[in-house]
């Protein structure tokens, strides 16, 4: 029996980890043994720790690069290692600048195609920012091309944070989606909450004679959809190694560390103001910090001009991963150091 694979893609801050978290919780409730691969652009693991903290899941982590290009060979190794644990399904969360089509091709290459089958390719969009991607990221033509690939390769497109925009904006987003992908199912939601039944349909605990899982076509709000006749088929794969250009060129991830006791000199307001200072450059920020001794460690996340805070049990040293376009690392580090000077 081939192991079903679900790929989660989407730009930075679109809600992939939140969806994966609920997907794992539902999988455990069904008695499934899922395997997880988490790809992070930065050198520090943030999202993988979130999954481990909330679900206890053992996560295969690929850090400091993108598995669709610079770390593609390592993804194949991670998948092979994961197969030894006999998972009932494998969930792959890609970094926000990854091209999922390259991962789909990898699954169709030998020897992985004998062991794995693509069950669903899911792309998430941030409804607040999706319409601005082309203008805001215009300096990185490769990234714009990748964001289109995230749409064209998807079976399901989740328009997340839909509650934060007007209905007219959602209509425009749907129009953009249909220009790139005429057959994908579309779900409008918030907090990445969708009907998980279609994603998990046909995935059952492994048995020697169990049939291969079949993809279900349902409304992700619950009602069945008419089956799409053109399943888009598999992507043609060349047996010879194919050179693939990077999925981005102007995006960089820089890990900002704290001086001894430095986090205690910060307040939430000062850190949020620092994020806002990099408007137009900062795409995503996330990390773990402790602002003061009585207060618990905080998971801080910045995305789309919004900053959120959440209690965490992270035991390590404080840090923030700063992801931006056309970053000047020297200036960034200089401004970061200035935050801790009284």
Image (cartoon, rainbow, N blue to C red):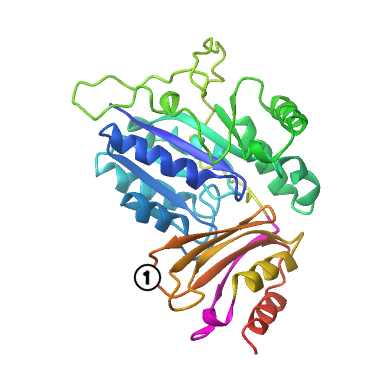
- Percent position of residue 108, x then y: 45, 32
Image: 237 above or below 9: above
The quarter in which the N terminus is drawn is top left
Residue at 29 percent of width and 31 percent of height = 30
Q: Kindly tell me whether residue 57 is visible in this rendering.
A: no
- Percent position of residue 286, x then y: 55, 62
User: Where is mark 1, residue-wise?
Assistant: 315
Crowd band around label 1 with a 10 angstrom C-alpha radius: few (<14), some (14–19), many (20+): few
Looking at the image, residue 188 sits to the left or right of residue 325; the answer is left
Occupied quadrant, residue 162 = top right
Residue at 52 percent of width and 31 percent of height = 237
Residue at 37 percent of width and 49 percent of height = 78
Q: Secondary structure at mark 1?
A: loop
Looking at the image, residue 72 sits to the left or right of residue 305; the answer is left
Image: 129 above or below 319: above
- Percent position of residue 24, x then y: 37, 40
Q: Kindly tell me whether residue 64 is visible in this rendering.
A: yes
Looking at the image, residue 220 sits to the left or right of residue 174; the answer is left
For the record, the magenta segment spans 249-266
Image: 159 above or below 316: above
Q: Is residue 61 magenta?
A: no
Residue that sits furthest to the left in the current view? 208
Residue that sits furthest to the bottom in the current view? 342
Q: How many marks?
A: 1
Residue at 19 percent of width and 26 percent of height = 207
The quarter in which the C terminus is drawn is bottom right
């Amino acid at each position: 029996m081939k192991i079903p694979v679900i790929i989660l893609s989407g730009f930075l801050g679109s809600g992939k980890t939140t969806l994966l978290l609920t997907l794992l919780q539902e999988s455990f409730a069904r008695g499934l043994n899922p395997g997880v691969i988490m790809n992070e652009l930065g050198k520090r693991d943030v999202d993988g720790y979130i999954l481990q903290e909330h679900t206890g899941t053992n996560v295969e982590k690929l850090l400091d690069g993108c598995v669709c290009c610079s770390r593609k060979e390592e993804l194949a190794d991670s998948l092979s290692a994961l197969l030894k644990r006999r998972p009932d399904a494998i969930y792959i969360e890609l970094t926000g600048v990854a091209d999922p089509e390259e991962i789909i091709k990898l699954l169709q290459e030998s020897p992985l195609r004998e062991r794995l089958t693509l069950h669903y390719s899911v792309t998430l969009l941030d409804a607040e920012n999706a319409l601005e991607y082309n203008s805001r990221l215009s300096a990185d033509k490769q990234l714009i091309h990748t964001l289109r690939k995230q749409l064209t390769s998807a079976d399901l497109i989740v328009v997340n944070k839909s509650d934060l925009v007007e209905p007219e904006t959602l209509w425009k987003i749907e129009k953009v989606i249909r220009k790139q992908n005429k057959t994908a199912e579309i779900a409008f939601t918030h907090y990445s909450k969708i009907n998980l039944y279609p994603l998990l349909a046909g995935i059952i605990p492994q048995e020697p004679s169990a049939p291969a899982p079949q993809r279900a076509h349902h409304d992700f709000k619950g009602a069945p959809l008419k089956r799409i006749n053109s399943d888009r088929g598999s992507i043609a794969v060349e047996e010879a190694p194919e050179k693939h250009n990077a999925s981005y060129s102007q995006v960089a991830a820089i890990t900002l560390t704290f001086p001894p006791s430095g986090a205690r000199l910060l307040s939430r307001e000062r850190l949020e103001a620092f994020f806002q200072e990099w408007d137009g450059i900062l795409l995503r920020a996330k990390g773990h910090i402790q602002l003061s001794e009585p207060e618990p460690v905080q998971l801080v996340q910045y995305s789309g001009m919004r900053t959120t805070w959440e209690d965490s049990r992270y035991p390590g040293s404080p840090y923030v991963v700063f992801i931006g376009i056309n970053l000047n690392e020297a200036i960034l580090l200089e401004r970061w150091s200035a935050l801790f000077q009284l």
